Each structure stands twice: as C-alpha cells, then as structure tokens.
Amino acid sequence: MVENAIEHGLRSSRRQPRRLIIALSEEKGICFIRVCDNGCGIPPDKMQGLFACETTHIGIKNVNERLKLSYGDNLGLIINSEADNGTEVIIRIPLQKNSPKP
C-alpha cells in the first residue's frame, strides 16, 4: 500500500508538499493501519474496478482477498479516494495472536 501511494499517488502529483501518512489505531480488538497520501487520487472509473477481476492490476484485489480469507469477510481493505485530493487505504486486521483462520 505504501508503494502504491508513492508510485501511483505521489509520483505523478504536482501538489507540494507531497505527504504520505502511515497511522495505526485500535478499536474493539481490530487494528486499523491507515496509509494516506495527498496525491492525485484514484479516478472514479478505476475505483470501481479495484476489487474486481476486470483489471490487469490485481495487487489490491489479491491483498484484500488474502486478508478476508485469513481473517474473515468483515476485515480487509477499505479505500477512500477523491481525484486530485489523495487516497486513504485502511487495512483492518485482528490484534489477537491466534486470530487467522486455520
């Protein structure tokens, strides 16, 4: 997610200063890892296909599917983005040591 923020969000952005923020928080046993940039954002047409099989860029889809397989359908990725205003990716995983599914 950090690589995506740099490569796809910040590298092509003309906004100065460019910012990348990584933050951790916890709520009710769930760890929230936020990767936020103030880059170019994701166009709405691309946002719709990020979790679908309709794209050749399958990294985000694969990460989300692996998280859901490991931890359940209620966890995984959330992506908020606005064109020209940046992107926020939230990774949701449990805090418990024995939390992955067998």
Image (cartoon, rainbow, N blue to C red):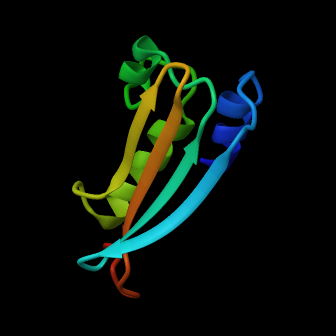
Q: From what the image shows, is residue 97 above or below residue 13?
A: below
Closer-to-camera residue (49/40): 40
Tell me which corner region of the image, top left, top right, bottom left or bottom right, holds residue 41: top right
**Among the 4 quarters of the image, the one containing residue 15:** top right
Q: In x, y percent, where is residue 73?
A: 23, 54
* Residue at x-position 60% and y-position 36%: 38
In the image, taking residue 92 as reference, residue 28 lies left or right, namely left
Q: Which residue sits at x=70%, y=44%?
A: 3
| x, y percent for residue 96 | 35, 85
Q: Is residue 11 above or below residue 101?
A: above
- Any part of residue 102 in sight: no
x, y (%) of residue 70?
Answer: 36, 64
The answer to whether one can see residue 44 in this image is: yes
Residue 20 located left or right of residue 35: right
Q: Residue at x 65, y 38 (%)?
A: 4
| 10, 60: nearer the viewer | 10
Residue beneath the point at 71% across and 33% down: 10
Q: Is residue 61 above or below residue 45?
A: below
| Residue furthest out toward the front | 16
| Image quadrant in which you'd find residue 25 | bottom left
Which quadrant, please, contains the C terminus?
Answer: bottom left
Toward the bottom, the furthest residue is: 97
Q: How many marks?
A: 0
Q: Position of residue 13 (x, y in %)?
A: 71, 24
